[in-house]
Amino acid sequence: MIAMKEKRITVTGGKGFLGTVLVNNLRQVRGCGQVTAADLPEYDLRTPSGVEKLFVEQRPEIVIHLAAVVGGIGANSENPGRFFYDNAIMGIQLLHQAHLRQVEKFVALGTICCYPKFTPVPFREEDLWNGYPEETNAPYGLAKKMLLVQSQAYRQQYGFNSIFLMPVNLYGPGDNFSPQSSHVIPALIKKCMDAIATGADEIRVWGTGNASREFLYVEDAAEGIALAAERYDKPEPVNLGAGFEITIRELAERIAALTGFSGRIVWDAGKPDGQPRRMLDTSRARSEFGFQARTSFDDGLRRTIEWYRHSRPQP
């Protein structure tokens, strides 16, 4: 177990959605006094100079790599080359330089998109290599998956302490609500709130609604990452999730009810559903470092909706 209070900790992507919550967790919950963020525009981690600047200026003993180029199905479909290159090059350079500079520990964040398209539910870490990822997000998922390969290879050859975590879709206050790049929960909240504001009697949603997903509240995700950074030092990847499954149709109906939208939900079956089903087996995280999600899904949705209600631009 690492005594993190006295360590210099760098969180890449530390000004983003998850990063902000994790930095706060490390500082306020764990009392870590030397936590810094490395994020755009100060640090462009796609470039060697940006990576070198991070290590020279911050001299981290622990690196938690959250920085990523992400988006929903539409953004992944429109930017497969960018999503592959940017995510792969960031991870490869950061982990390599962390090894060369003898960083004590590297925590790499993967994604549920690493899993094969038709993984049996619940997804077990042992199933990670049993097929190709779902096509719309495969470039992103595979770029992240290479961090696992690199982590394990550097541990085997150099004894470098790098771990790999795979969270499900995150949500919560501060999420990305951009129509161009948001994930499904903020996208649905925005659609419902916009419809209420304009008096529209319907919203249109991609796909059939039959696909299922699992969601992890952002504060729970931050706690899981912090626990793993403190307590987990093995080569095997670890799922981070809440351990439940909900269809997109049920999700849309629940968000409509919680926002107060009473109109029709129209499904655009010509648009892709993405991976058919997603739900993680979370037993490894529980047994290895004591992580279990604490926030109920309805509570998390209510907090997210309330945050957006008070933060959204007013017409």
Image (spheres, rainbow, N blue to C red):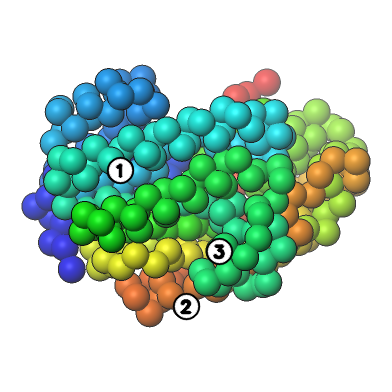
Quarter of the image that includes the C terminus: top right
Q: Residue at x 25, y 56 (%)?
A: 157
Q: Residues within 10 Å of mark 3 (few under 14, many from 20)?
A: some
Q: Earlier in the sequence, mark 3 or mark 1?
A: 1
Quick check: 303 left or right of 44? right
Asked if one can make out residue 58 in the rendered structure from this viewpoint, the answer is yes
Quarter of the image that includes the N terminus: bottom left
Q: Earlier in the sequence, mark 2 or mark 1?
A: 1
For residue 17, the mark is none
Q: Mark 3: which amino acid? A: Leu
Residue 145 vs 52, above or below: the answer is below
- Residue wearing tag 1: 95
Between the residue at mark 3 and the residue at mark 1, the CA separation in whole angstroms equals 21 Å
Q: Residues within 10 Å of mark 1 (few under 14, many from 20)?
A: many
Circles 2, 3 touching at the beta carbon (< 8 Å)? no
Secondary structure under tag 3 reads loop
Q: Mark 1: which amino acid? A: Leu
- Residue wearing tag 3: 128
Circles 2, 1 touching at the beta carbon (< 8 Å)? no
User: Quick one: 230 or 101, which is closer to the camera?
Assistant: 101
Please state which of the two labelled residues, at mark 2 or mark 1, is closer to the viewer: 1
- Residue wearing tag 2: 283
User: Quick one: 71 or 92, which is closer to the camera?
Assistant: 92
